[in-house]
């Protein structure tokens, strides 16, 4: 119970988004620093040239690059370790035999080289599953930016070349989220099958293309609940 002169203390890491009425909302105003949701000014500057005439930027942000693991890693990590060990070890053995000259009696040299190439291919796959996919994930997230306007959501992302993807807000479209206790979370736009969802945000996102197109999403953003509420309100006014 607070005393008469005490004031409730507010966590410096918490962020509360004031109700947005669009007519008086300051989310899209030039004074970006007054909006708690808005991140670094560079994030908003990257989206300004991509806005249509009359379109207002409500929020811009970026994912937390070092959030490496997602629920799908509960099985990907053990599988990648198992696959990696059982591919790297045979490669090392075969490579050692080739270097030392301890080949099978009567076996042509090209057979050992061919075996080394095949085993080496599996070793590369094993390395990517264990470590490479996480490196790719960090690099991609560092180049990713997200934005919400009064008409659509936008994503700038790409490992080698930045791709511009957007989705117009629809009151009837599906909108999902997964938020951690610290407020960081992901927002997905559209329906996602289990086969597609198991690879999303794991560094193996390309594998989901075999089961269907991956949805547009905001991954590992701070204050995910606030961004989710902003999107939910905005799409009702579209």
Image (cartoon, rainbow, N blue to C red):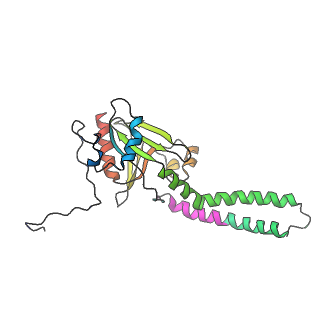
Q: Position of residue 143 (x, y in %)?
A: 48, 49
Most extreme residue toward the right, as rendered?
Answer: 106
Q: Residue at x 79, y 59 (%)?
A: 115
Q: Quadrant of the N terminus?
A: bottom left
Q: Position of residue 166 (x, y in %)?
A: 44, 37
Q: Position of residue 108 (x, y in %)?
A: 89, 60
User: Does the magenta run of residues contain 81?
Assistant: yes
Relative depth, front residue between 77 and 97 = 97
Q: Which quarter of the figure has residue 128?
A: bottom right
Q: Residue at x 77, y 60 (%)?
A: 116
Relative depth, front residue between 11 and 177 = 11
* Residue 105 in view (yes/no): yes
Q: Position of residue 148 (x, y in %)?
A: 36, 41
Q: Which quarter of the figure has residue 174?
A: top left
Q: Residue at x 39, y 46 (%)?
A: 43
Most extreme residue toward the top, as rendered?
Answer: 53
Q: Magenta region: which residues? A: 70-85
Q: How many marks?
A: 0
Magenta region, main secondary structure: helix
Query: Is residue 134 positioned above or below 238 on the image?
Result: below
Most extreme residue toward the left, as rendered?
Answer: 4
User: Does the magenta run of residues contain 92?
Assistant: no
Would residue 35 be found to the left or right of residue 116 on screen? Answer: left
Query: Is residue 217 positioned above or below 101 on the image?
Result: above
* Residue 190 in view (yes/no): no
Q: Quadrant of the C terminus?
A: top left
Would residue 36 be found to the left or right of residue 173 on screen? Answer: left
């Amino acid at each position: 119970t607070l005393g008469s002169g005490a004031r409730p203390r507010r966590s410096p890491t918490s962020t509360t988004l004031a109700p947005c009425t669009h007519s008086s909302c300051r989310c899209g105003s030039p004074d970006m620093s007054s909006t708690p949701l808005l991140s670094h000014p560079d994030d908003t500057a990257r989206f300004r040239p991509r806005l249509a005439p009359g379109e207002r930027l409500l929020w811009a942000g970026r994912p937390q690059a070092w959030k490496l693991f997602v629920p799908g890693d509960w099985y990907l990590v053990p599988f990648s370790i198992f696959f990696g060990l059982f591919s790297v070890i045979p490669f090392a053995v075969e490579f050692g035999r080739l270097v030392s000259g301890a080949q099978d009696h009567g076996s042509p040299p090209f057979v050992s080289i061919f075996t080394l190439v095949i085993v080496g291919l599996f070793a590369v796959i094993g390395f990517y599953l264990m470590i490479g996919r996480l490196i790719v994930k960090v690099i991609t997230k560092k180049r990713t930016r997200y934005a919400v306007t009064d008409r659509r959501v936008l994503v700038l992302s790409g490992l080698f070349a930045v791709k511009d993807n957007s989705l117009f807000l629809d009151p009837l479209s599906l909108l999902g989220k997964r938020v951690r206790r610290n407020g960081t979370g992901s927002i997905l736009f559209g329906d996602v099958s289990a086969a597609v969802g198991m690879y999303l945000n794991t560094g193996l996102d390309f594998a989901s293309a075999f089961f269907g197109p991956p949805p547009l999403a905001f991954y590992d953003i701070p204050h995910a609940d606030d961004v989710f509420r902003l999107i939910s309100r905005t799409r009702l006014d579209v």
